Image: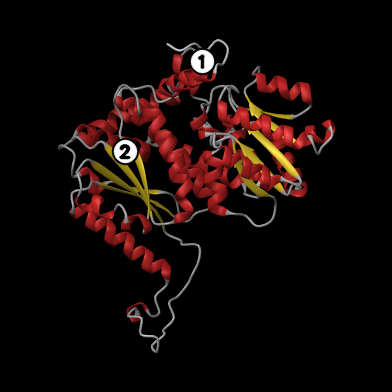
Amino acid sequence: MDLILNTALAERYAAPGETEAEAARARGFYRELAALSPADPAFSASGWVHCQEAACELELILRKAAEIRRDAQVFVLVGVGGSNQAARAMIEALKAPGGPEIVYAGNTLSAHYLQDVLRRIEGKSVYLNVIAKNFETLEPGSHFRVLRQAMAARYTKAELAARIVVTGTRGSRLEKIARENGYTFLSFPERVGGRYSAFSPVCLLPIAAAGLDAGAYLQGGEEMEKKLAAGSGGDAARYAAVRSALGRRGFSVEMLAAFEPRLFWAQSWWKQLFGESEGKGKKGLLPACMSNTEDLHSMGQYMQDGLRCMMETFLMVDDAGARLEVRPDPDFGDGFDYLDGMDFANINRAAEKATVQAHDAGGVPCVQLRLPRIDERAFGQLFYFFMVSCALSGRLLGVDPFDQEGVEEYKRSMFAALGKPGRNPR
Protein backbone atom coordinates (compact mmCIF):
# COMPACT_ATOMS: atom_id res chain seq x y z
CA MET A 1 0.00 0.00 0.00
CA ASP A 2 1.25 3.47 -0.93
CA LEU A 3 0.76 7.02 0.26
CA ILE A 4 -2.85 8.18 -0.36
CA LEU A 5 -3.98 11.79 -0.83
CA ASN A 6 -7.55 12.95 -0.21
CA THR A 7 -8.32 16.60 -0.97
CA ALA A 8 -12.11 16.37 -1.30
CA LEU A 9 -12.91 18.32 1.88
CA ALA A 10 -10.47 21.12 1.06
CA GLU A 11 -11.56 21.52 -2.56
CA ARG A 12 -15.03 22.67 -1.45
CA TYR A 13 -13.44 25.96 -0.37
CA ALA A 14 -12.04 26.75 -3.82
CA ALA A 15 -13.95 28.48 -6.59
CA PRO A 16 -15.69 26.16 -9.09
CA GLY A 17 -13.13 24.73 -11.51
CA GLU A 18 -10.23 26.50 -9.81
CA THR A 19 -8.53 23.41 -8.43
CA GLU A 20 -8.68 21.66 -11.78
CA ALA A 21 -7.24 24.70 -13.54
CA GLU A 22 -4.38 24.92 -11.02
CA ALA A 23 -3.77 21.17 -11.28
CA ALA A 24 -3.44 21.49 -15.06
CA ARG A 25 -0.89 24.28 -14.59
CA ALA A 26 0.98 22.18 -12.02
CA ARG A 27 1.13 19.22 -14.39
CA GLY A 28 2.59 21.50 -17.02
CA PHE A 29 5.25 22.69 -14.60
CA TYR A 30 6.01 19.07 -13.71
CA ARG A 31 6.58 18.19 -17.37
CA GLU A 32 8.95 21.15 -17.65
CA LEU A 33 10.83 20.05 -14.53
CA ALA A 34 11.13 16.44 -15.69
CA ALA A 35 12.36 17.50 -19.15
CA LEU A 36 15.03 19.99 -18.06
CA SER A 37 18.23 19.84 -20.07
CA PRO A 38 21.66 21.29 -19.25
CA ALA A 39 20.77 24.31 -21.41
CA ASP A 40 17.90 25.30 -19.11
CA PRO A 41 18.74 27.83 -16.34
CA ALA A 42 16.81 25.75 -13.76
CA PHE A 43 18.77 22.59 -14.59
CA SER A 44 21.39 23.43 -11.97
CA ALA A 45 18.80 22.96 -9.19
CA SER A 46 17.13 19.78 -10.45
CA GLY A 47 19.54 17.01 -9.43
CA TRP A 48 17.11 15.78 -6.74
CA VAL A 49 14.37 14.94 -9.25
CA HIS A 50 15.94 11.58 -10.01
CA CYS A 51 16.66 9.63 -6.83
CA GLN A 52 19.47 7.60 -8.35
CA GLU A 53 21.29 10.73 -9.48
CA ALA A 54 21.12 12.22 -5.99
CA ALA A 55 22.10 8.96 -4.27
CA CYS A 56 25.72 8.98 -5.37
CA GLU A 57 28.65 7.13 -3.70
CA LEU A 58 26.31 4.57 -2.14
CA GLU A 59 28.96 1.85 -1.85
CA LEU A 60 31.33 4.14 0.07
CA ILE A 61 28.44 5.34 2.25
CA LEU A 62 27.41 1.84 3.27
CA ARG A 63 30.98 0.80 3.97
CA LYS A 64 31.67 3.83 6.17
CA ALA A 65 28.31 3.45 7.92
CA ALA A 66 29.14 -0.14 8.84
CA GLU A 67 32.45 1.05 10.34
CA ILE A 68 30.67 3.73 12.37
CA ARG A 69 28.11 1.26 13.71
CA ARG A 70 30.89 -1.12 14.67
CA ASP A 71 33.38 1.30 16.24
CA ALA A 72 31.49 4.38 17.45
CA GLN A 73 29.75 4.88 20.76
CA VAL A 74 28.63 8.35 19.70
CA PHE A 75 28.00 9.58 16.16
CA VAL A 76 27.78 13.37 15.92
CA LEU A 77 25.83 14.76 12.99
CA VAL A 78 26.92 18.35 12.35
CA GLY A 79 24.58 20.28 10.08
CA VAL A 80 21.71 22.74 10.04
CA GLY A 81 18.45 22.95 8.11
CA GLY A 82 18.49 20.82 5.01
CA SER A 83 21.81 19.34 6.05
CA ASN A 84 20.29 17.30 8.86
CA GLN A 85 16.49 17.56 8.93
CA ALA A 86 15.64 14.60 6.68
CA ALA A 87 18.07 12.26 8.43
CA ARG A 88 16.96 13.39 11.87
CA ALA A 89 13.31 12.85 10.95
CA MET A 90 13.98 9.22 10.05
CA ILE A 91 16.46 8.44 12.82
CA GLU A 92 14.20 9.81 15.54
CA ALA A 93 11.07 8.17 14.15
CA LEU A 94 12.48 4.70 13.54
CA LYS A 95 15.15 4.34 16.27
CA ALA A 96 16.91 1.19 15.08
CA PRO A 97 18.36 -0.89 17.95
CA GLY A 98 22.10 -1.11 18.54
CA GLY A 99 24.79 1.12 17.12
CA PRO A 100 26.01 4.48 18.43
CA GLU A 101 24.14 7.22 20.20
CA ILE A 102 23.22 9.91 17.66
CA VAL A 103 23.99 13.48 18.73
CA TYR A 104 23.02 16.54 16.67
CA ALA A 105 25.28 19.57 16.46
CA GLY A 106 25.88 22.53 14.16
CA ASN A 107 22.23 23.57 14.46
CA THR A 108 22.40 26.31 17.10
CA LEU A 109 24.66 29.01 18.51
CA SER A 110 23.71 28.20 22.11
CA ALA A 111 26.78 27.86 24.32
CA HIS A 112 24.79 25.68 26.71
CA TYR A 113 23.79 23.26 23.95
CA LEU A 114 27.33 22.91 22.58
CA GLN A 115 28.74 22.44 26.06
CA ASP A 116 26.26 19.60 26.53
CA VAL A 117 27.40 18.00 23.27
CA LEU A 118 31.00 18.09 24.51
CA ARG A 119 29.90 16.46 27.75
CA ARG A 120 28.07 13.69 25.88
CA ILE A 121 31.10 12.75 23.78
CA GLU A 122 33.63 12.91 26.63
CA GLY A 123 35.44 9.60 27.07
CA LYS A 124 33.42 7.96 24.26
CA SER A 125 34.47 6.55 20.92
CA VAL A 126 33.35 9.35 18.60
CA TYR A 127 32.75 9.66 14.87
CA LEU A 128 31.81 12.97 13.27
CA ASN A 129 29.93 13.79 10.05
CA VAL A 130 30.12 17.46 9.04
CA ILE A 131 27.62 18.48 6.34
CA ALA A 132 27.84 21.88 4.66
CA LYS A 133 27.31 22.60 0.99
CA ASN A 134 29.58 25.65 0.79
CA PHE A 135 31.04 25.61 4.35
CA GLU A 136 30.23 29.25 5.08
CA THR A 137 27.29 28.68 7.43
CA LEU A 138 28.24 29.77 10.93
CA GLU A 139 26.61 27.07 13.05
CA PRO A 140 28.19 23.94 11.51
CA GLY A 141 31.51 25.70 10.85
CA SER A 142 31.93 26.88 14.43
CA HIS A 143 30.78 23.57 15.94
CA PHE A 144 33.16 21.64 13.70
CA ARG A 145 36.10 23.65 15.05
CA VAL A 146 35.12 23.06 18.69
CA LEU A 147 34.39 19.35 18.24
CA ARG A 148 37.48 18.75 16.13
CA GLN A 149 39.65 20.38 18.79
CA ALA A 150 38.06 18.22 21.49
CA MET A 151 38.68 15.08 19.46
CA ALA A 152 42.25 16.10 18.55
CA ALA A 153 43.10 16.16 22.25
CA ARG A 154 42.33 12.41 22.42
CA TYR A 155 43.16 11.01 18.98
CA THR A 156 46.25 10.97 16.80
CA LYS A 157 46.04 12.64 13.40
CA ALA A 158 45.57 9.26 11.71
CA GLU A 159 42.85 8.24 14.16
CA LEU A 160 41.13 11.57 13.67
CA ALA A 161 41.21 11.14 9.90
CA ALA A 162 39.39 7.81 10.22
CA ARG A 163 36.72 9.28 12.48
CA ILE A 164 35.73 12.39 10.52
CA VAL A 165 33.53 12.36 7.43
CA VAL A 166 32.77 15.61 5.64
CA THR A 167 29.99 16.09 3.11
CA GLY A 168 30.30 19.08 0.80
CA THR A 169 30.50 20.13 -2.83
CA ARG A 170 33.43 19.33 -5.06
CA GLY A 171 35.94 22.17 -5.09
CA SER A 172 34.68 23.65 -1.82
CA ARG A 173 36.85 24.55 1.15
CA LEU A 174 35.44 21.50 2.92
CA GLU A 175 36.80 19.18 0.22
CA LYS A 176 40.22 20.84 0.53
CA ILE A 177 40.11 20.32 4.30
CA ALA A 178 39.28 16.64 3.74
CA ARG A 179 42.15 16.24 1.28
CA GLU A 180 44.62 18.05 3.54
CA ASN A 181 43.70 15.98 6.60
CA GLY A 182 42.82 12.60 5.12
CA TYR A 183 39.12 12.78 6.06
CA THR A 184 36.55 10.76 4.14
CA PHE A 185 34.82 13.09 1.69
CA LEU A 186 31.27 12.57 0.43
CA SER A 187 29.84 14.64 -2.36
CA PHE A 188 26.98 17.06 -1.75
CA PRO A 189 25.66 16.98 -5.33
CA GLU A 190 26.10 20.38 -6.94
CA ARG A 191 22.63 20.27 -8.52
CA VAL A 192 20.86 19.53 -5.23
CA GLY A 193 19.91 22.28 -2.78
CA GLY A 194 20.05 21.66 0.97
CA ARG A 195 16.34 21.24 1.58
CA TYR A 196 16.05 18.95 -1.47
CA SER A 197 18.95 16.73 -0.38
CA ALA A 198 16.90 13.94 1.23
CA PHE A 199 18.11 11.26 -1.20
CA SER A 200 21.75 12.35 -1.34
CA PRO A 201 24.75 11.38 0.84
CA VAL A 202 23.64 14.21 3.14
CA CYS A 203 20.90 11.91 4.45
CA LEU A 204 22.06 8.45 3.39
CA LEU A 205 25.21 8.20 5.53
CA PRO A 206 23.51 9.27 8.79
CA ILE A 207 20.53 6.95 8.37
CA ALA A 208 22.76 4.01 7.44
CA ALA A 209 25.05 4.73 10.40
CA ALA A 210 21.93 4.73 12.58
CA GLY A 211 21.06 1.23 11.36
CA LEU A 212 18.22 2.16 8.99
CA ASP A 213 17.68 0.47 5.62
CA ALA A 214 18.94 2.96 3.04
CA GLY A 215 17.96 0.59 0.23
CA ALA A 216 14.31 0.45 1.30
CA TYR A 217 14.30 4.23 1.70
CA LEU A 218 15.61 4.77 -1.83
CA GLN A 219 13.12 2.21 -3.10
CA GLY A 220 10.27 4.26 -1.65
CA GLY A 221 11.60 7.42 -3.28
CA GLU A 222 12.00 5.72 -6.65
CA GLU A 223 8.50 4.26 -6.42
CA MET A 224 7.03 7.71 -5.85
CA GLU A 225 9.22 9.16 -8.61
CA LYS A 226 7.79 6.65 -11.12
CA LYS A 227 4.23 7.09 -9.87
CA LEU A 228 4.32 10.87 -10.21
CA ALA A 229 6.05 10.69 -13.58
CA ALA A 230 3.27 8.45 -14.90
CA GLY A 231 0.69 11.13 -14.10
CA SER A 232 2.68 14.28 -14.93
CA GLY A 233 2.96 15.04 -11.25
CA GLY A 234 -0.12 13.09 -10.16
CA ASP A 235 -1.05 13.61 -6.51
CA ALA A 236 1.83 16.03 -5.97
CA ALA A 237 0.33 18.30 -8.64
CA ARG A 238 -3.10 17.94 -7.01
CA TYR A 239 -1.76 18.88 -3.54
CA ALA A 240 0.10 21.87 -5.00
CA ALA A 241 -3.05 22.91 -6.84
CA VAL A 242 -5.20 22.80 -3.69
CA ARG A 243 -2.64 24.89 -1.79
CA SER A 244 -2.58 27.42 -4.62
CA ALA A 245 -6.37 27.60 -4.96
CA LEU A 246 -6.83 28.07 -1.22
CA GLY A 247 -4.11 30.70 -1.14
CA ARG A 248 -6.04 32.63 -3.77
CA ARG A 249 -9.11 32.43 -1.53
CA GLY A 250 -7.25 34.15 1.32
CA PHE A 251 -6.01 31.15 3.31
CA SER A 252 -2.49 32.13 4.36
CA VAL A 253 -1.42 29.39 6.80
CA GLU A 254 -1.06 25.64 6.33
CA MET A 255 -1.09 23.54 9.50
CA LEU A 256 0.51 20.10 9.16
CA ALA A 257 -1.10 18.00 11.88
CA ALA A 258 -0.02 14.52 12.92
CA PHE A 259 -1.40 12.22 15.61
CA GLU A 260 1.86 10.29 15.82
CA PRO A 261 4.69 11.92 17.87
CA ARG A 262 7.25 9.96 15.85
CA LEU A 263 6.55 12.34 12.97
CA PHE A 264 7.61 15.46 14.90
CA TRP A 265 10.92 15.86 13.06
CA ALA A 266 9.35 14.99 9.72
CA GLN A 267 7.00 17.90 10.32
CA SER A 268 10.01 20.11 11.04
CA TRP A 269 11.58 18.98 7.76
CA TRP A 270 8.35 19.84 5.91
CA LYS A 271 8.21 23.25 7.60
CA GLN A 272 11.67 24.16 6.36
CA LEU A 273 11.05 22.77 2.89
CA PHE A 274 7.96 24.88 2.24
CA GLY A 275 8.94 27.92 4.29
CA GLU A 276 12.32 28.38 2.66
CA SER A 277 11.04 27.51 -0.82
CA GLU A 278 7.91 29.67 -0.95
CA GLY A 279 8.39 32.56 1.48
CA LYS A 280 9.45 35.10 -1.16
CA GLY A 281 8.10 38.32 -2.64
CA LYS A 282 5.69 38.63 0.29
CA LYS A 283 4.01 35.42 -0.87
CA GLY A 284 3.52 31.86 0.35
CA LEU A 285 1.47 29.97 2.90
CA LEU A 286 3.02 30.06 6.36
CA PRO A 287 3.90 26.43 7.25
CA ALA A 288 3.06 25.48 10.84
CA CYS A 289 2.80 22.17 12.70
CA MET A 290 0.72 20.50 15.40
CA SER A 291 1.67 17.31 17.25
CA ASN A 292 -1.62 15.83 18.40
CA THR A 293 -3.37 15.03 20.54
CA GLU A 294 -1.13 17.15 22.79
CA ASP A 295 -1.43 20.32 20.74
CA LEU A 296 -5.20 20.02 20.61
CA HIS A 297 -5.05 21.15 24.23
CA SER A 298 -3.10 24.27 23.30
CA MET A 299 -4.06 25.11 19.71
CA GLY A 300 -7.32 23.20 19.37
CA GLN A 301 -9.50 26.15 20.36
CA TYR A 302 -7.86 28.41 17.79
CA MET A 303 -8.10 25.79 15.04
CA GLN A 304 -11.78 25.32 15.82
CA ASP A 305 -12.89 28.91 16.30
CA GLY A 306 -10.05 31.31 15.54
CA LEU A 307 -9.34 33.44 12.49
CA ARG A 308 -10.29 31.48 9.35
CA CYS A 309 -6.96 31.90 7.58
CA MET A 310 -5.77 28.28 7.83
CA MET A 311 -5.93 25.13 5.81
CA GLU A 312 -4.94 21.90 7.57
CA THR A 313 -3.13 18.88 6.20
CA PHE A 314 -3.50 15.76 8.33
CA LEU A 315 -0.54 13.38 8.11
CA MET A 316 -2.15 10.04 9.01
CA VAL A 317 -0.69 6.57 9.64
CA ASP A 318 -2.69 3.35 9.27
CA ASP A 319 -0.40 0.97 11.18
CA ALA A 320 0.34 2.34 14.66
CA GLY A 321 3.37 0.08 15.00
CA ALA A 322 2.28 -1.16 18.43
CA ARG A 323 -0.70 -2.60 20.27
CA LEU A 324 -1.72 -1.64 23.78
CA GLU A 325 -5.16 -2.49 25.11
CA VAL A 326 -6.91 -0.76 28.01
CA ARG A 327 -7.57 -3.43 30.62
CA PRO A 328 -10.64 -3.30 32.87
CA ASP A 329 -10.11 -2.00 36.41
CA PRO A 330 -13.63 -1.96 37.93
CA ASP A 331 -12.53 -1.49 41.54
CA PHE A 332 -10.55 1.70 40.95
CA GLY A 333 -13.43 3.90 39.88
CA ASP A 334 -11.53 6.31 37.63
CA GLY A 335 -14.47 6.91 35.28
CA PHE A 336 -12.76 5.53 32.19
CA ASP A 337 -14.47 2.13 32.06
CA TYR A 338 -15.91 3.04 28.65
CA LEU A 339 -12.42 2.41 27.26
CA ASP A 340 -12.25 -1.20 28.51
CA GLY A 341 -10.95 -3.53 25.83
CA MET A 342 -10.04 -0.75 23.40
CA ASP A 343 -6.63 -0.55 21.77
CA PHE A 344 -4.84 2.80 21.99
CA ALA A 345 -4.31 2.74 18.22
CA ASN A 346 -8.08 2.79 17.75
CA ILE A 347 -8.53 5.45 20.44
CA ASN A 348 -5.97 7.64 18.68
CA ARG A 349 -7.64 6.99 15.32
CA ALA A 350 -11.00 8.01 16.76
CA ALA A 351 -9.48 11.27 18.04
CA GLU A 352 -7.99 11.90 14.61
CA LYS A 353 -11.28 11.28 12.81
CA ALA A 354 -13.20 13.48 15.26
CA THR A 355 -10.69 16.31 14.79
CA VAL A 356 -11.01 16.24 11.00
CA GLN A 357 -14.79 16.33 11.31
CA ALA A 358 -14.77 19.15 13.87
CA HIS A 359 -12.27 21.33 12.02
CA ASP A 360 -14.06 20.79 8.72
CA ALA A 361 -17.34 21.81 10.37
CA GLY A 362 -15.55 24.84 11.81
CA GLY A 363 -14.55 26.13 8.39
CA VAL A 364 -11.02 24.77 8.03
CA PRO A 365 -10.19 23.23 4.61
CA CYS A 366 -8.82 19.77 5.46
CA VAL A 367 -6.44 17.66 3.35
CA GLN A 368 -5.69 14.07 4.36
CA LEU A 369 -2.38 12.40 3.50
CA ARG A 370 -2.29 8.80 4.63
CA LEU A 371 0.77 6.57 5.10
CA PRO A 372 0.43 2.79 5.46
CA ARG A 373 3.05 2.72 8.23
CA ILE A 374 6.16 4.53 9.45
CA ASP A 375 9.19 2.82 7.95
CA GLU A 376 12.03 3.58 5.54
CA ARG A 377 10.01 2.91 2.39
CA ALA A 378 7.17 5.15 3.57
CA PHE A 379 9.64 7.95 4.35
CA GLY A 380 11.04 7.62 0.84
CA GLN A 381 7.59 8.06 -0.65
CA LEU A 382 6.66 10.89 1.69
CA PHE A 383 9.82 12.95 1.21
CA TYR A 384 9.78 12.64 -2.57
CA PHE A 385 6.07 13.51 -2.70
CA PHE A 386 6.57 16.65 -0.63
CA MET A 387 9.66 17.80 -2.56
CA VAL A 388 7.87 17.58 -5.91
CA SER A 389 4.75 19.20 -4.42
CA CYS A 390 6.84 22.06 -3.08
CA ALA A 391 8.60 22.66 -6.39
CA LEU A 392 5.26 22.75 -8.24
CA SER A 393 3.56 24.84 -5.56
CA GLY A 394 6.34 27.42 -5.76
CA ARG A 395 5.98 27.64 -9.53
CA LEU A 396 2.21 28.10 -9.20
CA LEU A 397 2.92 30.89 -6.74
CA GLY A 398 5.27 32.58 -9.18
CA VAL A 399 8.46 32.25 -7.10
CA ASP A 400 11.68 30.32 -7.58
CA PRO A 401 11.31 27.35 -5.19
CA PHE A 402 15.05 26.63 -5.26
CA ASP A 403 16.73 29.85 -4.12
CA GLN A 404 16.82 31.40 -0.62
CA GLU A 405 17.90 34.99 -0.90
CA GLY A 406 16.11 35.92 2.33
CA VAL A 407 18.31 33.50 4.28
CA GLU A 408 21.41 34.85 2.58
CA GLU A 409 20.46 38.39 3.65
CA TYR A 410 20.33 37.43 7.33
CA LYS A 411 23.69 35.69 6.93
CA ARG A 412 25.24 38.80 5.43
CA SER A 413 24.01 40.91 8.33
CA MET A 414 25.22 38.38 10.90
CA PHE A 415 28.67 38.02 9.31
CA ALA A 416 29.02 41.81 9.24
CA ALA A 417 28.05 42.05 12.93
CA LEU A 418 30.67 39.42 13.79
CA GLY A 419 33.37 41.16 11.77
CA LYS A 420 33.91 38.51 9.11
CA PRO A 421 36.39 39.85 6.54
CA GLY A 422 34.75 41.11 3.39
CA ARG A 423 31.28 41.26 5.00
CA ASN A 424 30.48 44.94 5.41
CA PRO A 425 27.07 46.04 6.65
CA ARG A 426 24.80 47.66 4.06
Residue on which the image places disc 2: 238
Q: Is residue 294 or residue 271 the one in the foreground? A: 294
What residue is shown with label 1?
A: 38
* Residue 58 % position (x, y): 67, 36
From the viewer's perspective, tell me whether residue 147 is left or right of residue 350.
right
Please report the residue visible at 65 percent of the width from the left and 20 percent of the height from the top.
Answer: 170
Q: Which residue is drawn at 50% across and 46% down?
A: 379
Q: Which amino acid does label 2 sit on?
A: Arg
Q: Name above or below for residue 364 compared with residue 334.
A: above
Mark toward the start of the polypeptide (1 vs 2): 1
Task: Indicate left or right for 359 with 239 as reference.
Answer: left
Is residue 207 something one can see in this rendering? no
x then y, percent, for residue 307: 19, 44
For the residue pair 96 and 367, the one nearer the viewer reads as 96
Contact check, label 1 and label 2, Cβ < 8 Å? no
Q: Within 10 angstroms of label 2, few (less than 14), some, or many (20 or more) residues?
A: many
Q: Distance between the residues labelled 1 and 2?
A: 28 Å
Amino acid type at circle 1 is: Pro
